[in-house]
Image (cartoon, helix red, strand yellow):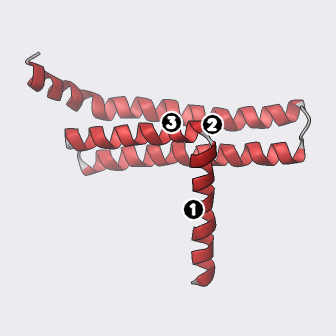
Amino acid sequence: MRRFLCSLKFAAGGIALGVCRERNMRIHLIATAAVVLLAIWLDVRPVEWAVLLALCGLVIGLELVNTAVERVVDLVSPERHPLAKEAKDAAAGGVLAAAIFAALAGLIVLGPPLWHKLQELFGL
């Protein structure tokens, strides 16, 4: 149990590092907060909550992996190298791809109920 608690402490430290030092992580967290607030307001179904939270978690998790890749590449190859650039670009591309698909899924899940809510509010 002690090892598990230590692992949780280290993992929480990694998340804190990402939040404190990575601007994109903060952007993803703000986007996640906006999605959560919108989903609450729209009273989405449990399965829709599961999709939204899983995709937000995926993007945030990949951002942490991207941060780890960048740190390791900088440690191993402090000078510019084409392979170092490719590794960093691929990791960043993974985050971008996940974020794009998460945004599309968010539009599919949240778009129709948001449209209906706006129609009710503004008589459209």
Q: What amino acid does circle 1 point to?
A: Ala
Residue under circle 1?
Answer: 12
- N-terminal of the pair, mark 1 or mark 3, is 1
Tell me whether the residue at label 1 lies in contact with that at label 2, contact meaning CB atoms closer than 8 angstroms: no
Residue 49 locus on image (x, y percent): 31, 48
Give residue 5's quadrant in the image.
bottom right
Q: CA distance from mark 2 to mark 3?
A: 16 Å
- From the top left corner, tell me how far across and down residue 117 is, in percent: 16, 29
**In the figure, is residue 10 to the left or right of 48?**
right
- Compared across the picture, whether 67 is left or right of 86 comes to left
In the image, which disc is placed on residue 23? none
Position of 7 with respect to 32 (left or right) is right
Q: Residue furthest top?
A: 124
Verify CB contact (< 8 Å) between mark 1 and mark 3.
Answer: no
Q: Which residue is mark 3?
A: 27
Comparing labels 2 and 3, the label whose residue is closer to the camera: 3
**Type of residue at label 2?**
Gly
Dot 1 or dot 2: first in sequence order is: 1
* Residue at horizontal 29 percent and vertical 41 percent from the top: 37
